[in-house]
Image (tube, rainbow, N blue to C red):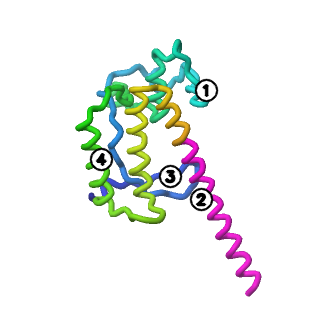
Amino acid sequence: MDDSDIEEKKVGKSPIKKRALITNFLKWSAPSMARKDEIYGRTKAPLNIERPISLETKCGELREVLNCIRPPRAWCEDGVYWRQDVSDEPTTRPEVLALAEALDEAIIQSNARETGLCELREVIYADIFDELIRQVAINCIERGLLLLRIRNEAEDSIISFRRLYSSSLAYGVRKTLEIS
């Protein structure tokens, strides 16, 4: 894996930069032409993943759930607007086995640490988890929504743990300076 596979990326609104591996485990549909307002104008409120979905509203909400996993990609090329959504095609068993092999290969090629905190491994596993959520949501929307909630809660917990760790380090440094 060469340096072209890794890009510098800002984390949220933070000025801290994180090296993120560009992964492509999530399956996308073929790009389609779109109108400018479809790309830049939001006509519907985002899906509330906290509420249960009734059987009557299930139809058509798969696309919304898939858009919660990752928003559609959008770009303009030669004055033509393009859009690419997360794929809604079911996955076969051989594709899942190939995904597992691709995961192992990505971990090895990225030189991610096997234990402890590793941002590269975190990015790879997050992308794989998004693909698994996609696969489950296609078969059962409710399970997909439950996995989305779990993913979001885990991400929030990790962010909280990082803040707590930084805060405790700063506290330890202040106390050490006070003593000396």
The vertical placement of 170 against 88, above or below, is below
Label 1: which secondary element: loop
* Residue 100 in picture, x, y percent from top left: 30, 47
3 vs 1, front mark: 1
Which numbered mark, 1 or 2, is in the foreground of this view? 1
x and y percentages locating residue 176 in the rendered image: 71, 81
Q: Earlier in the sequence, mark 4 or mark 1?
A: 1
Instruction: Estimate the x, y position of residue 73 in percent, counting from the top left.
Output: 40, 33
Residue at disc 3, secondary structure: strand
**Nearest to viewer (mark 3 / mark 4):** 4
Q: Amino acid at mark 2?
A: Arg
Residue where numbered disc 2 is placed? 162
Seen as rendered, the residue at the extreme bottom is 180
Q: Any mark on residue 10, and which? A: 3
Q: Residue at x 34, y 25 (%)?
A: 80
Give the spatial CA distance, label 3 vs label 4.
29 Å
Residue 76 forms part of the magenta stretch: no
Q: Which part of the image, by quadrant, shows the N terminus?
A: bottom left
Which residue is identified by label 1? Answer: 51
Residue interval drawn in magenta:
152-180
Horizontal side of residue 7 vs 48, given as left or right: left
Given residues 33 and 174, the one toward you in this image is 174
**Amino acid type, mark 4:** Ala
Dot 3 or dot 2: first in sequence order is 3
Mark 1–mark 2 CB contact (< 8 Å): no
